[in-house]
Amino acid sequence: MPRSLLLGFAAAVLPILSAAAAPATPDEAARLSALLERYVGRAAPGEAPRETVAPKGDGYAVTVDLKRSLAGLDAFGFAIEPYTVNMVLTPRPDGTWRVQSDDTAPLVMHAGDQTISLTARTSAFDGTFDPKLGSFSSFREDQTGAGDERGTPTFVQSRHTGAVALSGTGVPAENGTVSTASHSVGTGAGGEVTFKPKPSDPSPGNPAVPPPSGAGTTLSYASATTRTDTAVDRLDAPRVLDLWAFLAAHPSRDSVTAAQDELKGLLRAGLPYLGALKQTGALDAPSLSTPVGIVSARTAGLSLEASGLGGTGKAGLSVSAADIVAPPGQLPPWSAGLVPTALDLHVGIDGFHAAEAAKAAVDVVDLRHDVIITPEQKEQVGRVFLPDGGTLTLQPSRITTKMLDLTMEGRAALGPQPGGRVTLSAKGLDAEIAALQAQAATDPGAGQALGPLVLAKNLAKPNPDGTLGWVIDFGHGPITVNGAPLQ
């Protein structure tokens, strides 16, 4: 997916290019190369060009030096190691372009203290770029041996996929924007996550020799199949392209800093750049290897979405898993009825103002200083982001165990006086209490778990469907459960 995004940005210069020359000619290649300079930057005297365009059959072989074209990103702590985008552009009679690429060179990026690298054993991209959209109307990318690694001083994540197929479409949206949708399927996916301790301070006795640090904790995971769907609504591709051209024209931190007023104007003009975003992912037969054993499930899913990014926004996160199996032999017998076997959780937040907060950040950022935004300014931006505190919601959710079936929902205001209500219901509580009581005589752990469950039952009220229920109110006086103050 990241390589496809890079190709998309590189091909986004095509709205300014004529797709009428066929067969390809050296004169047309030279014209296209000159037009590309706005988006890749003009080479200094004696410096190699940042792009090449050469006839190839009915089309043109195009290369773009991505590192040099986006050198201005260094002003924001982002850098790309030497990397050349290679693609073949073929004009079509309807004014669109066929874009093909088979790049497999490693791509390495740095963002602050994080390093991101992308690799692939084989890669084939084929898409139709529509200048009227400023985007691909359709594309497909197939890779084998795909992998990526993200690392910081305290965290390293590596992922690999045996084979992945990605396809997508783009359609026109309002005010010259484009809405896109993509779908990917990967097989043989897996990876590792390592959490490393923070580097220790030097020893007081010998400042030059820091004490040894632990190796950290590593978790590995695998999934037979992964599926991801991504939808972007009302992407303002021309405004993104304007930013690309600015960075190409200002290839150093000093030049970006000197022109930061122009940059701020471009940023303000494009915000919020998109109206809504949604991504859903699903895993078949996922497993997680931990220091205490393997946790597995039949399926797992994750969904993220955000809308109203140009006004009053809302966002949601959903997590689900079915047929969860805990590591055998690692948990005490009395906990068997309390360990989740399935979950379906949905949380959301609304009332934020993403575009206004982004504009507030643009206003106060000053690239002339080492600290481009102060803690006080960050707080100011935060108040613009959530001027009234917003609202946190627990949408209808469910957790099940071998003995219990729990449902829950709630809502809480996050303003100066936070408060809200959570409603819970449970089925199977009596049976779980009875099971723990039977084990408490010989297992102290069962007795310790029994107390909170008995208290919960005493506070509950029966629901018409036979379940037990709790209505918990908080934030305005003492916490109450079913109207009674919690002592």
Image (cartoon, grey):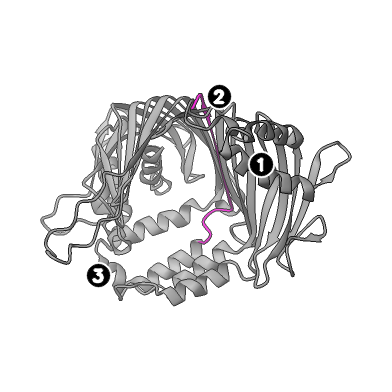
* 240 relative to 148 in the view: left or right: right
Q: Position of residue 221 (x, y in %)?
A: 41, 31
Q: Quadrant of residue 211?
A: bottom left
Inter-mark Cα distance, 3 to 2: 53 Å
Circle 3 packing at 10 Å, graded few (<14), some (14-19), many (20+), is: some
Q: Earlier in the sequence, mark 1 or mark 2?
A: 2
The numbered dot on residue 298 is: 2
Q: What amino acid is labelled 2 in the image?
A: Arg
104 displayed left or right of 1: left
* Residue type of the residue flagged with mark 1: Leu
Above or below, comparing residue 423 to residue 171 in the picture: below
Q: Residue furthest right?
A: 464
Mark 1 or mark 2, whichever is nearer to me: 1
Q: Which three-letter amino acid code belongs to the residue tagged 3?
A: Asp
Q: Quadrant of the C terminus?
A: bottom right
Q: Secondary structure at mark 1?
A: helix
Q: Which residue is tagged 3? A: 254
Give the residue pinned by disc 1.
450
Q: Which of pointers 3 and 2 indicates the residue nearer the eye?
A: 2
Residue 461 is situated, as x and y percent measured from the top left of the image, at: 84, 47
Q: Earlier in the sequence, mark 3 or mark 2?
A: 3
